[in-house]
Image (spheres, rainbow, N blue to C red):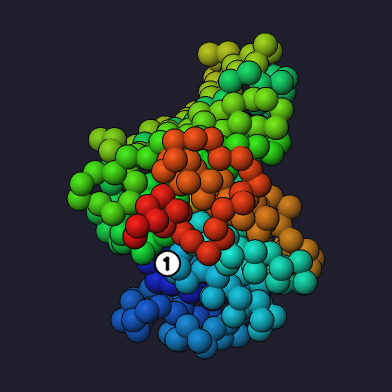
Amino acid sequence: MTRWALAGAGWMAAVHGLAVRSLPGQQVVAVASRTREAAAALASETGGEVVAYDELPAGADIVVVATPPGRHAVDALRAMAAGTAVVVEKPLCTTLDQADRLVRVVEAGGMLTYAENLLFADATGTALSEIASIGPLRHLSARALQPRPTWGDFTRRHWGGGVLFDLGIHPLALLVRAAGTRVAGVRARFDAAPDVEVEDHAQLTLRFDTGLTAELEVSWRAPSPVWDLQAASDGGVVRFDLLPELALERDGEPVALPPLPEEGERAAVPPQLHQLGYLEQLRDAEAAWRAGRPSTISDVHLGRDLLEIICAAAVSARSGEEVPLPFTGPRDRTPAELWRPEW
């Protein structure tokens, strides 16, 4: 039996709690939140004892850190200091200083899986394989467009950043993995509605060290969700749609995606847990913990790399110029603070 603790009691903690309960041989043993009431409500659904943050890991083998981003580093560091593995929700943390510290602890033996769930999904693996098979890319783009969230503090500057920091980090991970090489520079434009404190629309051009450029658009201004990824080369065109419907095409023809498991998980498990990679993410984290090695799919270095790109994009959105990577700007500022230093 693998024992899990949930740090946080919001939507993402609930998703992970459901994923844990759906897998055989897994158990939630503790839930912590800012309020005992929120922790108790989630514990009633997932099982586990209600504890305070500073009581974690509370007997768990693995702690899922699904607290607000400003808490990610402290919660992950506390758990790793106790000898426990962690799964840290996106974004990894709010500043590059925090990310650097997490990397140092992992390189000294700490266990951390960065929870970019899409990279664990079977459908994403199939899409990336198709992209790799068409040869050197000449076009790469992604979009994540959806309505503004009506819950939480996502539109407040203390969250750490806006739509790119919270939503755009998912398609950004797909672009980096599809390109298969390092981002050398980023140019960005941010826009903010007058009633929010952070950007709610962002457009990025990523320049890779191979010369390939990729376009990314993320927005909280769309009437309904649209998430997609497109790649083209002299050898073909691949289109991967995640929302509103999961689909994959090559040269306009459908490509079969892996079927959903029919057995082994509880019948009540929503199919999205499979389609979006949450179950495989936890399986991978458990396997990494048992083997005493980092995740081979999504680790602390990827989390820091993505945050570095977002920080560079924030500086570019302020200056209007391309910002080269590796990032040489302030490492103690959040993306929101880098975009608008007067804050």
Q: Position of residue 230 (x, y in %)?
A: 53, 25
Residue visible at 78% across and 63% down in the picture: 293
Mark 1 residue type: Pro
Other-residue count near label 1 (Cα within 10 Å), few / some / many at <14 / 14–19 / ≥20: many
Q: Which residue is mark 1?
A: 68
Counting labels gives 1
Q: Quadrant of the N terminus?
A: bottom right
Locate residue 60: give its quadrant.
Answer: bottom right
At x 76% / y 66%, what residue is drawn?
Answer: 107
Name the residue located 61 percent from the left edge and 40 percent from the top edge: 324
Relative image position of residue 81 (x, y in whole percent) = 66, 81
Instruction: State left or right for residue 25 relative to residue 339.
Output: right
Q: Is residue 244 above or below residue 250?
A: below
Residue 68 falls in image quadrant:
bottom left
Q: Nearer the viewer, residue 147 or 156?
A: 156
**Which residue is at the front of the view, 333 or 110?**
333
**In this view of the protein, can residue 125 be seen by the observer?**
no
